[in-house]
Image (cartoon, rainbow, N blue to C red):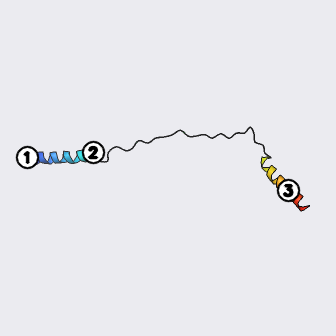
Amino acid sequence: MKNLALAAAAALAITATTATAGGMSQPVMEMDPVVIMEDQSGSSSSAGLIIPLILIALIAAAAT
């Protein structure tokens, strides 16, 4: 009878230690997505052409 009680106590002790193994995990902080809006008020489609046109004019003036 004592052996059965010791076996049951040992089984409970082993399962109790494995149930608490690992501890708590770190909390995960989730952030809201960031939306970046581009300013459309001051841009034009020909804005990228100004600098090359100025360079062409300077080269033409230097060649003359």
Q: Which residue occupies the extreme left position in the image?
A: 1
Position of 53 with respect to 42 (left or right) is right
Name the residue at 29% across, 47% down. 21
Question: Residue 18: horizontal and vertical position, in percent?
Answer: 26, 48
Q: Which residue is mark 3?
A: 58
Mark 2: amino acid: Ala
Q: Which mark is residue 27?
A: none
Q: Quadrant of residue 63?
A: bottom right
- Assign a secondary structure to mark 1: helix
Mark 3: amino acid: Leu
Q: CA distance from mark 3 to mark 1?
A: 104 Å
Position of 54 with respect to 25 (left or right) is right
Mark 1: amino acid: Lys
- Assign a secondary structure to mark 2: helix
Name the residue at 23% across, 44% down. 16
Q: Which residue is mark 1?
A: 2
Q: Decide which of tag 2 and tag 1 comes sooner along the chain.
A: 1
Q: CA distance from mark 2 to mark 1?
A: 26 Å
Q: Quadrant of residue 44?
A: top right
Closer to the camera in the image, 62 or 60: 62
Q: Decide which of tag 3 and tag 1 comes sooner along the chain.
A: 1
Q: Which mark is residue 19?
A: 2
